[in-house]
Image (cartoon, rainbow, N blue to C red):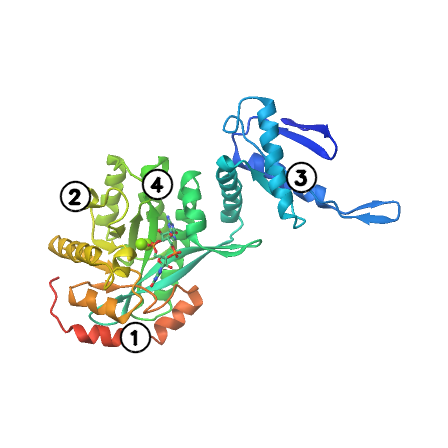
Amino acid sequence: TKSGVTVGYLGGHEFAVVLEQVDSVTHVSTVLADLHERLHEPLTIGSTRVQPAIWAGVSLFPEDGYEVERLLDRAAAAADQAADIRDGRVHFYSSEKNAASVHALLLSSRLAHAIEADELRVHFQPIVNANSGEIEFAEALVRWEDPVHGLRFPNEFVSVAEQSGLIAALDRWVLTRACAQAALWCANGSANMPSVTINLSGAHLAGREGRFVARAIQNALENSGLAPTRLVIEITESRLVEVDPAMLQSLQVLREQGVRIAVDDFGTGYASLSYLERLPLDKLKIDQTFVAAIGRDARKEALLESILMLALRLGLTVVAEGVESEDQATFLVRRGCHLLQGYLFSHPVPPEEFIRLTKFWSLPLAAQRALSASGIKRPR
Ligand code: C2E
Ligand code: MG
Ligand code: MG
């Protein structure tokens, strides 16, 4: 058949499809999607309409074996698993070991398509000033409006994007959208609209495209007309990240222009403490697991207090994320935390709703109590 695709009849109701040179994600998934579509078409045999049912199993060379026999066995075993589910759709199962990698392959190719087809959305979550109770920042959080699966959250696809090299494109897409949105808020007159914060993956910064990040940010600012002082970037890190001098330089340049830099999820990850030493930082976001530990886990609570003190000593602005309860807010505000973010104030919401939220902003009662209970002069 077509180049690189061999189809063989194995007997009974079994066929084998061999794909060669599977180095590109798009290649595999196009073939799989194509197969799915064609084989699922109803057939008319005589006067009877037949709806074919297909089950497929995938095995990969060399992960699942070096010999044809073994690869076929494993593909067949995977197809049996698929058949067990029997919901009339094609299931591409693989042996346990590579199920995850096949899933990631398919997902990343769909994600690449989603970025181009404009299926991504940006939601915004308020970050509230602990002194004034005003919304000072809006964090841009990516969502995927998947036509097949519905609304998908970043924990489902950001790490796949990081592994497949799509993360730079994803981050740039969000950056562009979020800057345009924030510029629109300012242009529409609302005097004290919040600044916008976006997430940049450490994998992106440390990767090939890391050195272009300053350029991308400058472009987004210029094209949207947003002032650099209205943008904060949060560096999120999911794996150990080398701090490359070229990347450092570009962060420095941005900072001189007024863009502020935050380290996200502080206290988890690999390089958190050394980041404080090596990166030009303005803000520190304490990871939500520490906030969740307030009143529950004394050790973690002690760590939280120490992180707060450390950040204040270094002159960093401290943000606590994942604040859900009045007790948590009170605890944080009493210890000098500057900014609070979490469901206690608001969930992340679509842009239209965010505008409404800022227009008619009033602190929820529990939050009001927490903020007024503090009454403490905090070091800046
Ligand atoms: P993050 O940057 O630490 O964002 C905070 C996450 O906590 C968000 O999840 C938010 O919806 C959630 N959250 C906010 N308040 C609360 C709360 O009170 N309780 C709880 N339990 N959760 C709360 P989300 O939107 O699912 O994003 C997850 C992560 O995905 C983000 O964590 C960030 O690391 C990453 N991410 C999101 N958008 C982007 C993006 O555009 N680029 C990159 N590279 N990463 C992104
Ligand atoms: Mg963040
Ligand atoms: Mg976080």
Identify the mark nearer the N-term, 2 or 4. 4
Whole-angstrom CA distance, mark 2 to mark 4, is 19 Å
Give the quarter of the image for residue 377: bottom left
The residue nearer to you, when weighing 1 against 197, is 1
Q: Three-letter amino acid code at disc 1?
A: Leu
Quadrant holding the N terminus = top right
Q: Residues within 10 Å of mark 3 (few under 14, many from 20)?
A: some
Q: Residue at x 82, y 49 (%)?
A: 49
Residue 75 vertical placement versus 121 (above, below): above
Mark 4 residue element: helix
Circle on res. 277: 2
* Image location (x, y in percent) of residue 6: 67, 27
Whole-angstrom CA distance, mark 4 to mark 1, is 36 Å
* Image location (x, y in percent) of residue 327: 24, 69
Q: Three-letter amino acid code at disc 2?
A: Glu
Whole-angstrom CA distance, mark 3 to mark 1, is 54 Å
Foreground label between 3 and 4: 3
Circle on res. 35: 3
Foreground label between 2 and 3: 3
Q: Is residue 51 left or right of residue 173?
A: right
Per the image, the residue denoted by label 4 is: 203
Per the image, the residue denoted by label 1 is: 363
Q: Residues within 10 Å of mark 1 (few under 14, many from 20)?
A: some
Mark 3 residue element: helix
Whole-angstrom CA distance, mark 2 to mark 3, is 53 Å
Residue 10 vertical placement versus 379 (above, below): above
Circle on res. 329: none
